[in-house]
Amino acid sequence: ILSLNTRGGKNRRVRHALMKRLLALNADIICLQDIKSLVSSSCNQGCPFCLPKSFHNFFTGSGINRGVLTLITKKMKIVSCVKEYSSRSDWHKIRISSNGVEFYIINAYGPNEKSFPFFQSIINNTQRCGLLPIILLGDLNVDLDNTSHSSPNRAALQKVILSLRLVDVMKKLCPGTFSWSRGNQKSRLDLALVSPFFTNRIRKAFYRPEPSSDHKLIELEMMCHHRNFNCKIPNWVLDDNKFRDKLSRNLEATIIKCHTAYQAV
């Protein structure tokens, strides 16, 4: 799972180069924030470089401010985009089913100015939609670590974390790191907040530098679900007469032993 503030994503050359780098990481879910439009300004809606054909795409934006774009591999079952919010900033929530697990992905681009409704809308909608686990990703524009710096939305984001019982997985797995820098300023504005269900299912979480942005890329590596291994004997082995004769004798001997043991009981 990847998440990045793209700083606009409007220029065609930059947008296509960014998408090429993201796809090379073999992600199943890509969450982009601060993105101007569904595709770059000089591309049409069917551009496979802006919107890879192997991914479902969901865009939420007011048309005035920059929005959020989520790409989800078509290997996953998309249940629905259950909610989107667009005002001074944007978020949307998508319900996904993968490997028998249903969960929500929330892609959020938080406001710089004070906006209690933005954060409260996440709480209200998620509490109404049941108890499915959540992965909330994005540039929330709040540095939870630097309490000496005044943030108009720190209390509102902390309320989201407490109300939905989320874990700051970036702080847990890569403490002391930052995701945004400009000059001498450094902050951890880009967050991955997850339900306790996911805390032991995330193998790695780290920030990766991205040359097209002053924000770093969030990368989450999830645990794989191991499937049952079915042993199948190749046809070329079965066609070997010696193997078939030996297999028949062994099966016959095993059946006789089982029958003898059953009679003894």
Image (spheres, rainbow, N blue to C red):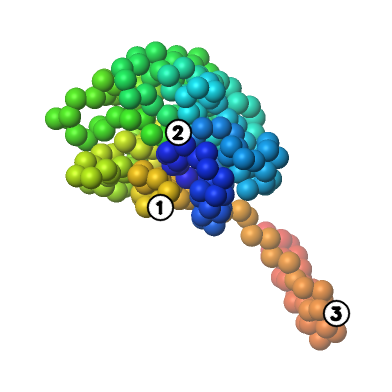
The residue that appears at 50% across and 28% down in the rendered structure is: 67
Which one is in front, 48 or 1? 48
Q: Is residue 162 visible?
A: no
Q: CA distance from mark 2 to mark 1?
A: 16 Å
Q: Which residue is mark 2?
A: 34
Q: Whole-percent x and y of residue 30?
A: 52, 42
Instruction: Choose the circle earlier in sequence order: 2 or 1.
Output: 2
The quarter of the displayed image where residue 50 is located: top right
Q: CA distance from mark 3 to mark 2?
A: 61 Å
User: Amino acid under label 2?
Assistant: Asp
Which one is in front, 214 or 119? 214
Q: Whole-percent x and y of residue 12?
A: 56, 45
Q: Is residue 3 visible?
A: yes
Label 3: how many Cα within 10 Å (few below 14, some 14–19, many 20+): few
**Residue 233 shown left or right of residue 221 in the figure:** right
Q: Which residue is mark 3?
A: 239
